Amino acid sequence: MKSSSGESRVTESLDGEWQFLIDPDDGEGGTLSEPGADWSDAERVSVPHAWQEDEAHREYTGTAWYRRTVEYDGAGDRVFLRFGAVDYEATVYVDGQRVGTNRDGYLPFEVEATDALSSGENVVAVEVTDPADLSEIPHGKQGAPWYTRVSGIWQSVTLEARPERFVDDVRVTPDLDDDTATVEVTVDGDASDLDAAVTVSRDGEEVAAATCDVDGGVGSCTVSIPDADYWTPENPVLYDVGVELRAGDEAVDATETYFGMRSVGTDGDRLYLNGEPLYVRGALDQAYYPDTLYRPFDDDLYEYEVRTAKELGFNMLRKHIKPAHPDFVEAADRLGILVWQEPANPTIYSERSKREVREQFRGMVDRDYNSPSVVAWSLYNEEWGIGLDQEDYSDHEDRLWNDEEKQDYLTELFHEAKEWDPTRLVCDNSGWAHVATEINDYHEYYVSPDRAEPWADALDEIAANPGDNYATENTPAEDAPILVSEFGTWGFPDLPKLREHYGGDPSWFSHDFLEDPLKRPQGVDERYEATDLPDVFDDYDDLTAAWQRREAVSLHGVIEEMRTHEAVAGYVVTEFSDIEWEFNGILDYLRDPKEHLADEFATVNSEVLVAIDAETHVLAPGDEITADVHVVNDTTETLEGELRWSGPGTEGEQSVSVDGFGTTTVEGAITLAPTGDDATDHHSLDVTLDAGDREVSNEEPVFVVASEAPDRTVYADEPLAAALETGGVAVTDDLDEADVAAVTEVDADVSAFVEAGGSALVVPEPDGRMTESDAFDYRSLPAGESWNLVSSLLYQDSDLLADLCADARVGWAFEDLFPHDLAEDLDESTDEIHVGSVEGWIANWGSPLVVRDRGDGRVCSCTFRVTDRYGEHPTATALVDRLLGEL
């Protein structure tokens, strides 16, 4: 045993080899706690340990046992067994004597073993029960419909000897108004003759000291911190606190902790850190790992994660749906990144689930109260466990939106949370249906450029009507800053790399609850081969590169729209890393930055951003458009420098002065004017801000698209007929005179025309929706937010589109044209697929541009929304002209 926090305490780690045994009686016998119990069938495991790490026990739910011998030398007046976390219910025995129990899967607990331990060898046994039914238990994303279960002693175990009377807790509350810190000391045992000597130091140098009386078991003293340095992510200054319990001149116990001088608040529009405005650039962090599940697979993993997050431009990580590992919180404190935490969620709303959520939240506050990195709490996420079935998002009377009793309960819990911890922000229900909150946060899954315009409109609506995000305003919506705390886009993982790591397909490929192939990796190879993807991409690596590039472009557009919108106070991207089947991370599941994403993401996520706001990303030769430049400055530093740019038909520079914290806009800074001789091609508009020691750059794609009316006589219906005629295309209302038809509906006459050898181009109605026909079946896509769309890839390998796309992705050249419907039931062997679409793990294959034989003729389904944009949108014009020419 070695000295821990003073001569009065001695701590021994019990990590390492334990025996492990699945209970043959599933917890009914109880005989395995006895020292002489039969453990002959036990396995050897290394604690910390979750039994799902072993393939043989991956699906097991019920009771299991851990056991080891402990050599105890008789030190201390009292002895405790301390567990970092055990999932879920733990009963602890020493030499067959039951010494304590705990129910909670994520937080530390201890049991006193003083009367059960004796000098010499002792047998410690832990009975762990994790039931199949988790519905009332705060369990996070374990099991259906998400990820792998976690059960067992998954954090560290220690044996600690202490004096009869000892410091049980030290809580430090900084006050930046007068640079003081109030230290509250709680004592276990008779404290009637004790006082506590408090010493505050920094880097080994004492900066303050005081003594407080602890009669009654609790004492408090306030010390001044001279020349206080405030904790920030850029300057994570920590102060050490030593507390020595004294009975007169005799030292009874001593312990140490740390804290930071830090405050967090809001003014209704913005967040503030230490009184300075704060723009949140965060990522959702679920902290699941490939082999070890809830625990880090390397000793320095948390340091690596924090440093990597900061390199990517993040200043916050939202630890999602379960308390963070204490070692992560320590790394965040020491290295400097903000943390938003929340308890794990149950599935259903009951007296038990409410009680356990409340207890877990209180435990989080107690554990992390002194940690300066933790600046915000959530109580629930998306109504999980308080009204919403995760597999059925339909509205019903039990939703938080509709249930006054639940609204009252959550409001009461919010106010309790603020009493327990007034030093941090509290969000009642992350995402929507707020009732009492200091953060009005939204979960909005829009993909860009596919739904860029609806996303901009949604932000305007959010800004105009923040109260619409509340079930009831028991705290005013106008008092809570707006954050978008979930959004994102998927980017296919490096599948060969995953399989190499696991030695084949990982077990989570085939979770029983993953029935939707969008989420189910099992069968991905067969689904891949059943599409035209093998004809478009060389291999999975090629597909991954395109898909991750799609993720980069989408996040770029979505984030720029938020950062240049004055109503938004910050964002949290979903998510920091891929987690099992969910491949929407900036890092992959093995925690490596995604090769085709990370660099561009760091640009748009940096504390200073140059955002280019062009009238459009696509123009015709001879057109002229302007672009504003927004310089978003999340620092409080004023920047002076030169703005330089270059692009098609433009090059220049301009002196700028950029205000501290906020957005400085240079309106009409850039004019793009490609010459009339330019051919169709993709270009880049590059802008750089050179402000001395700070240089930041960004770019936006620009497509110059030329078109030539086809030498065809076209039968067309309105509104396309008039637009074609205006564009110089010969139009007829007689099918007998037509070379090709361009219609929104295949009626009997058009069908006969095709059957007899003609060709028809079928385009959407002006509302963007396709009319059903015998030629194609259609699947409808949402026109706005869509979790399916953010998981999708729209790809092409077509001579018709090659110069309209920078690579295999369909991108900004199709701005405002992206489809609302897709043709499905495709046949790769007979259909001529110009553009394909897949979602998630190669599901829902469809096409917005496909040609199919019908009788002696051909019919082309084009679901790109070109119908009322022909002649105005260069890509719409070129695409229709080319299709009419080819058909």
Image (cartoon, rainbow, N blue to C red):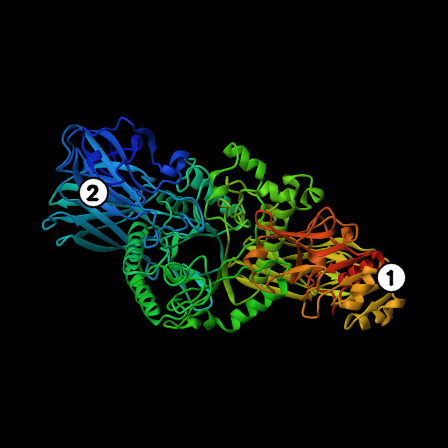
| Residue 76 rendering spot, x and y as whole percentages | 15, 35
Measure the alpha-carbon separation of dots 1 and 2: 83 Å
Tell me the element at label 2: strand
Q: Is residue 402 left or right of 460 when viewed as pictured?
A: left
- The reply to whether residue 642 is in sight is yes
Residue 222 or residue 411, whichever sits in front: 411
Disc 1 on helix, strand or loop?
A: loop
Q: Position of residue 476 (x, y in %)?
A: 40, 73
Q: Nearer the viewer, residue 446 or 571?
A: 446
Residue 604 x %, y % = 59, 54
The answer to whether the residues at label 1 and label 2 have Cβ atoms under 8 Å apart is no
Measured as percent of width and height from the top left, residue 181 is found at: 29, 55
- Front-most of 294 and 503? 503
Q: Quadrant of the N terminus?
A: top left
Which of pointers 1 and 2 indicates the residue nearer the eye? 1
Residue at 29 percent of width and 30 percent of height: 18
In the picture, the quarter occupied by the C terminus is: bottom right
Decide: few, some or many residues near mark 2? Use Cα within 10 Å; few <14, some 14-19, many ≥20.
some
Which disc number belongs to residue 710?
Answer: 1
Q: Mark 1 or mark 2, which has the lower sequence index? A: 2
The one nearer the camera, 600 or 173, is: 600
675 above or below 721? above
Please give the residue where the numbered disc 2 appears in the rendered image: 111
